[in-house]
Amino acid sequence: MKKVTLSQLNCPTERVEELERLFESRFGAKPSRWFSAPGRSEICGNHTDHNRGKVMAAAVNLDVIAAVEPTDDGTVTVKSVGHEENRVDISELSALESEKNTSTALVRGVLAGFRARGYKIGGFNAYTQSDVLKGSGLSSSAAFEVLIGTVLSGLYNGGEVSPVKIAKIAQFAENAYFGKPSGLMDQMASSVGGFTKIDFEDPEKPLIEAVSLDLEAHGHSLCIVDTKGSHADLTPDYAAIPAEMKAAAAFFGKDCLRGVSKAEIIANLPALREKVGDRAVLRALHFADENARVDSLAEAIKSGDFAAFLSVIDRSGESSYKYLQNVYSCAHPEEQGVSLAIYLAKSLLDGEGAARVHGGGFAGTIQAFVPKHKLESFISGMEGVFGEGSCHVLNVRPFGGVEVAP
């Protein structure tokens, strides 16, 4: 496991000192170990991972950090700033219906995933603090899951559990214990770190390709704008996307869309529409086109064609808006903050940069690549509508889940 210093983490000393104080106040002693896992930004590949598609993602400089001390009492206790404490007895790791949609379920699920795969587990106390914006599309839940997996790897497995395996265990926890049918992209991007293209055709052996993109050199900043929309009651909206995509795949005798070509979809449109409905067909077409866009984006980065990069980002956003249809919930059509933010962003950018829905969609955030000379006016314009502090300028973090050297 990679170890980094506080300076490499760009973590303020005050943040660590405060967390150490909180840990000592709660557990009666100072922590001996420190760990961190980052949030992530999906760059392209919107809602493709759950059907074994391709994605481009980047770990970002916002993270969840943990002060940790191993214990021998067979209990994992995790206290997070601003949240209730999670306690799990490692002798009882069955999924509990009463814990669904809770952080305790994630802790229990990661522990169960480690044990099921033959890794060692044990007790520990942890106090965590996160600056990954909740509901921001930066995947705070994946960062938390990866953090727990990174702690278990560091404390009990010599830091030898690979980032890919930690990501798979984290996804297992979210799917089987938390109850959210997510793909693997969030956890993989957080665990691996950097700017990466990931191909999930074989989910047991995803192909990971590191790519290098220096936004500063191209005179742009990566911004995430929080529209302050609520993610409450949106699980059915999220769950419908993989379900409809897989229904379209089932028409062709496949278990996911990765085995279905765009030509096959178009050739069978009349029967497919009748069988699964128009929205499922449009989402299947989005999947096919989005996979191709991820390849195009990677080629644009490698060739240094930043104009092509921005064009792919915009086309991805347009497809998510029109065909994937994840910019607002059909159950709450009066709430369309993401749609409004995209319109405002494009108005402020005025033909430059790029903007698209960010993350799972339906509420929350948009992503924008903003030219430096427009950054100040962009932030001012977005925060004038969505509130002070709603526009965040991010940096790409070159590493994923790590232990932090004292």
Image (spheres, grey):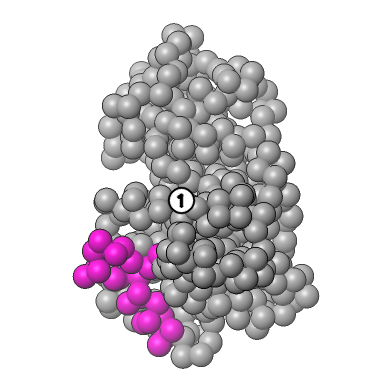
Q: How many marks?
A: 1
Report the residue that reaches farthest toward the bottom: 350
Placement of the N terminus among the 4 image quadrants: top right
Residue 67 in the figure: left or right of residue 154: left
Where's residue 385, x and y in %?
A: 27, 76
Query: Which of 333/387 is in front?
Result: 333
**Image-based side of 350 in relation to 194, left or right:** left
Residue occupying image coordinates x 73% and y 49%: 207
Look at the image and say whether residue 345 sits in the magenta stretch. Answer: yes
Quarter of the C terminus within the rendering: top right
Residue shown at 70%/45% (left/top)? 202
The residue at 37%/82% (across/down) is 343
Residue 51 visible in the shown view: no
Q: Position of residue 260 (x, y in %)?
A: 65, 59
Q: Specify whether 399 is left or right of 361.
A: right
Q: Residue furthest right?
A: 303
> Percent x, y for residue 82?
28, 40
Mark 1 lies on a secondary structure that is: helix
Asked if residue 266 is positioned above or below residue 2 in the image, the reply reads below
Residue 336 appears in the rendering? yes
Question: For residue 385: magenta?
Answer: no
Residue 180: x, y in percent?
A: 41, 42
- Badge 1: few (under 14), some or many (20 or more) residues near its Cα, within 10 Å? some
Q: Is residue 169 above or below residue 24?
A: below
Residue type at mark 1 is Ala
Q: Is residue 36 above or below residue 237?
A: above
Q: Residue at x 44, y 75 (%)?
A: 322
Q: Nearer the viewer, residue 266 or 117?
A: 266
Pointer 1: what residue?
243
Magenta stretch in the rendered image: 326-348
